[in-house]
Image: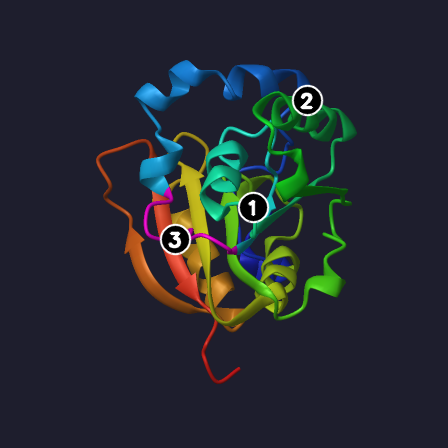
Amino acid sequence: MTSSAQNGRAPCQCHRVCPWWMGWMLANPLRTLVENPRHLTAGLVDEGHRVLEVGPGMGFFTVPIAEKVGANGKVVCVDLQPRMLTGLKRRLIRKGLLGRVETRECTPTDLRIQDLAKSMDLAALIHVLHESPDPRAMLRQVAAALRPGGRMLLMEPKGHCRKDLFAAELEAAKDAGLQLQNQKLDDPGRNLKAIFQQPVGS
C-alpha cells in the first residue's frame, strides 16, 4: 500500500482480504477469552438500534449485537465474500436471529448502502478497514449512513495495523466529517480502538 501523500488515501499495512475459510475460526467461542464482543461494544448498542456492520465475517460480533438490538432493532451486514455471508446466515438461523439481520454483498469500493443514508445509530468497522483498497471511500460511505448523533466504532488488530497507520485512519475518518470522541492507541489488549460521532447538526 502506498502512502497517503502518494494516493490521497489513508495508509494501511495491507488490503488483503481475510479468506472465507478462516471465518469459522474467527467465530470460535473460545475467542471471547481474549476478545469479548459484548465488552468491546458496551455502551454503543441499545434496544431498537439500527446497526451497520462492515465485514462481519461469520458473525463473531454480529450475534451479540443482534441480541442487544432486540426484536425492534436491525443489523445490516455488508461483506464482499458470499461464503462469509452464507456462514453468517447459518449461525443466525441457529441462534434464531436471522429476522433481525439483513445481509448484503458489496464490492471492494462500493458498500451498496446508499439507501441507508442518515438512518443508522451505529456503524461497526471491526478489523476490516485495513483490508480496504480505499479506506477513505469506505469511511465516506459509512459516515453518510449515520444519523446525526450516530456513532462509529473503528477497531483494528495491533498485529495488522501499526499505531501510525491507525492514526492515519483516524484522520481519514475526520476528513469524512466524523468527530472523534474517544481513542485508545495504548490499549493493553489486542486492539486499537476509536469511537466517532456524526455531528448532531449535520
Q: Which mark is residue 44?
A: 3
Note whether residue 127 is visible. Answer: no
The reply to whether the magenta stretch includes residue 129 is: no
Which element type, helix, strand or loop, lies under badge 1?
Answer: loop
Q: Nearer the viewer, residue 104 or 192?
A: 104
For disc 3, the neighbor class at 10 Å (few under 14, some 14 to 19, many from 20) is some
Rendered image quadrant of residue 183: bottom left
Residue 171's place in the image compared with 81, above or below, is below
Distance from disc 2 to disc 3, alpha carbons, whole Å, reads 26 Å
For disc 1, the neighbor class at 10 Å (few under 14, some 14 to 19, many from 20) is some
Image location of residue 57, percent across then percent down: 61, 30
Compare marks 2 and 3 and give the one earlier in the sequence: 3
Residue occupied by mark 2:
90
Residue drawn at 39 percent across, 40 percent down: 162
Which element type, helix, strand or loop, lies under badge 3?
Answer: loop
For disc 2, the neighbor class at 10 Å (few under 14, some 14 to 19, many from 20) is some
Residue 189's place in the image compared with 178, above or below, is above
Residue occupied by mark 1:
71
